[in-house]
Image: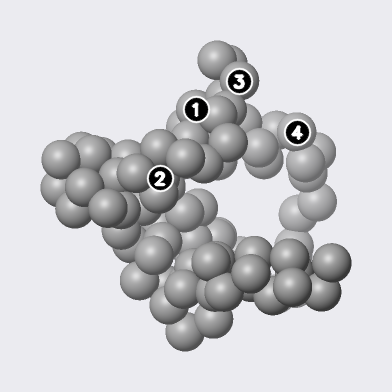
């Protein structure tokens, strides 16, 4: 069993750690146009679990940008609390 865990780690270790930002950027490129990444990376991304039909994959850069703007616009003395579901809807449609 230990060998199986080590094998799984070795097969996926390039997807984490210091490479995470690089891989995320590649994935966002793949989401915008799969032909923009190499065939090897296309196979990796195509092998990811499939999302249900009603779930649209969102690039993380949009989510990060949304929270950066939110942090800059929010005054520390008047933080508003809102329903997490409404925030989720905003994240789905932020551009």
Q: Name which residue lies at 27% across and 53% down.
A: 40
In this view, the mark in front (1 or 3): 3
Q: CA distance from mark 4 to mark 2?
A: 28 Å
Q: CA distance from mark 4 to mark 3?
A: 19 Å
Q: CA distance from mark 1 to mark 4?
A: 16 Å
Label 2 sits on residue:
45
Q: Name which residue lies at 39% across and 65% down.
A: 23
Disc 4, SS: helix
- Residue 52 — which label? 3
Relative image position of residue 72 (x, y in whole percent): 51, 70
Disc 2, SS: helix
Q: Residue furthest right?
A: 1
Q: CA distance from mark 2 to mark 1?
A: 15 Å
Disc 1, SS: loop
Label 4 sits on residue:
85
Which of the image's four quarters has the N terminus? bottom right
């Amino acid at each position: 069993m230990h060998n199986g865990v080590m094998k799984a780690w070795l097969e996926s270790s390039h997807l984490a750690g210091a490479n995470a930002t690089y891989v995320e950027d590649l994935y966002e490129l793949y989401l915008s146009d799969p032909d923009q990444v190499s065939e090897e990376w296309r196979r990796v991304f195509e092998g990811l679990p499939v999302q249900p039909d009603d779930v649209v994959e969102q690039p993380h850069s949009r989510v990060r940008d949304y929270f950066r703007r939110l942090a800059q616009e929010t005054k520390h003395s008047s933080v508003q609390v809102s329903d997490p579901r409404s925030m989720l809807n905003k994240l789905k449609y932020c551009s």
